[in-house]
Amino acid sequence: MIGQIKGELIVSCQALPDEPLHSSYIMSRMAVAAREGGAKGLRANSVEDIREIKKIVDLPLIGIIKRNYEGVDAFITATMKEVDELMEVHPEIIAVDATESTRPNGELLEDFYKKIREKYPDQLLMADCSTLEEMEKADALGFDFIGTTLVGYTKQSKGIKIEANDFELIKKALTIVKHPIIAEGNINTPEKVKRVLELGVYSVVVGSAITRPQLITKTFVEAIHQN
């Protein structure tokens, strides 16, 4: 089943509590719309959303839990608590923060990775990274998929643009990373999706440009008022 995402689009169906579409029911319908549009995979946040999506959509799913911990920067499936919760709904892939950002209880990524592998040896894991060095480390640890998810969103990647110089970061990653790369983060046009797939990534995730209407609307309004 997981092979069907190769060379295809994954749609991220997420809405946080402060967003207008925050609802497990709405995210499940968003997943249906993504499937009808031709998406071959999904990414979703929270046990509740994943459970509702899986009831009506049979596509490979990347599961995460976003949870903030006081005093640390990592927030995407940052501890075993989130991994255990996700295993209740069995997403095909679990994505975790694999950056050098501070982690709950000062835990090292390699120790966290080892714990997951020991407890759930058959679970596919994706590393959400923000720099080339983080991707290289996650690859060496043995993550099944390496994601560019957090490029430009962490302190250590501030100012880095994934699309810069015709996706130079992805090009470099493809030369040093052995595991499949899933491109994600600010790949917000059909042209960008096509280009990164041409470069050789395994799959591409698009989120806000498809599933966050408040942000889509904002781009149109800003265009109207540009000087």
Image (cartoon, rainbow, N blue to C red):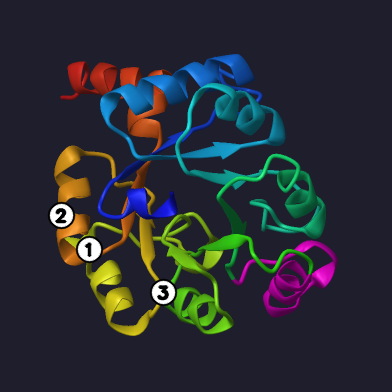
The residue to which callout 2 is attached is 195
* Of labels 2 and 3, the one closer to you: 3
Residue 223 position (above or below residue 167): above
Q: Quadrant of residue 39?
A: top left
Picture coordinates of residue 109, whole percent (x, y): 68, 74
Q: Position of residue 175 (x, y in %)?
A: 27, 82
Nearest the eye: 103 or 4:
4
In 3D space, how far apart are the residues under numbered discs 2 and 3 (Cα atoms)? 20 Å
Q: Which residues are magenta?
A: 100-118
Residue at label 3? 179
Q: Nearer the viewer, residue 71 or 31?
A: 31
Q: Are marks 1 and 2 in contact (CB under 8 Å)?
A: yes
Q: Quadrant of the C terminus?
A: top left
Mark toward the viewer: 1 or 3 = 3
Q: Residue at x 33, y 32 (%)?
A: 209
| Residue 69 shows in this picture | no
- Of badges 1 and 2, nearer the viewer stands 2
- Under mark 3, the amino acid is His
| Crowding near the residue tagged with mark 1, few <14, some 14–19, many ≥20 C-alpha atoms within 10 Å | some
At a point 18% along the width and 65% down the height, the residue shown is 199
